[in-house]
Amino acid sequence: MRNASSLPPALTRRSFALPESDACGVSRGRTRARDLTTLSRGVRAPAGVEQTLLQQVHPHLVLLPDAVASDETAAMLHGMPLPPWLQSGDMLHLTRPAASAAIRRNGIHGHRRSLRATEVVRVGGLPVTSIARTWVDMAGQLGVEDLVVAADWMVSEHRRDFGDPRVAKVPIAELHAYTSSLRGTRYLRRLEEALELTRVGVDSPPETRLRLMMMREHLPEFSVNCRIDPARTHRPVWTDLGSREYRVCVEYDGLHHLTPEQQALDNERDALTALAGWRQIKVNRLQLRRGSAVVVDPIRRALRDNGWRG
């Protein structure tokens, strides 16, 4: 049997639409060779080649020029935090205008919606629903807590005396204004509830979940990214969650805290926190998974020791 002719380099590492291979002078017979996999009608991929999500989406948007990546697909392209069960990427989500025909293609979950021009952005050159619009579209899939996790990620911004400044992907005032413009949208109450719980300055999804756990247990609300000003210390200290009234702070220690460099920085922070007269409680991911009985009781005791009567 004759070996299949080589594909143009542009088509050897990613899936492609047949109009793309046509434009490269590849015959339709060549696109039926065994070294190519048919992913969907009019879409081929080199067998055994791993692809990024952007590469998987690309050929479908070539075939559907009025479509945009949306929902879980858009969330993953933006880097939005999602619960694990939504991160498989087994189905690609595309949205077409409400007046267009429904999308019926293998591996595609199609949607039809009316989108404003401001609700579509470019990611890697491809049209994708904006971060805020993607958050709205995910409200049918996500509960309030997961929506807060995503919203905290969107609005997070801060400037500290260490590290790079963080700029909000969507400023919280803009997110409030956008949500207020969505009258009649499905799941609007869920979105509004999540927005009421959203806070600026959170560094990671576990910190959001920790903060919400503390709120559910009716502890006084702690400030996010709380600055402890110098008293006897030589510089300010920044803590994940802090109650200035009761001088209690809570730190979430993720995996990056296990490196020797980070542990040295943490030891200095811990010493300065104690010098400032604050009680510090540390929480790690295993404790967070075990639930509020493990996490909240030490925080509650520290608050009561420092005068809280809740």
Image (spheres, rainbow, N blue to C red):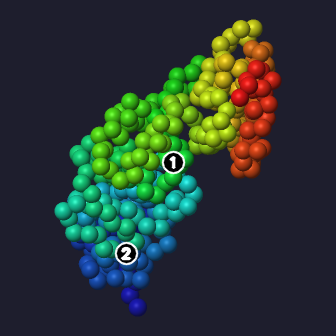
Comes first in the chain, label 2 or label 1? 2
Q: In the structure shown, which secondary structural element does the residue marked by tag 2 occupy?
A: loop
Which amino acid type is marked by label 1?
Val
Position of residue 161 measured from the top left corner of the image (x, y, whole percent):
59, 19
> Which residue is denoted by mark 1 in the rendering?
144
Please say if 91 is above or below 249.
below
Give the SS element for disc 1: helix
Q: Amino acid at mark 2?
A: Asn
Q: Percent position (x, y) of residue 176?
A: 38, 35
Residue 83 percent location from the top left of the image = 55, 54
When the figure is inspected, residue 192 is found, relative to residue 289, above or below; the finding is: above
Q: Looking at the image, which residue is at 59% across and 28% down?
A: 224
Work out which quarter of the rendered image holds the N terminus and state it: bottom left
Mark 2 = which residue? 106
Q: Is residue 238 left or right of residue 27?
A: right
Please say whether residue 189 is visible from this viewpoint: yes
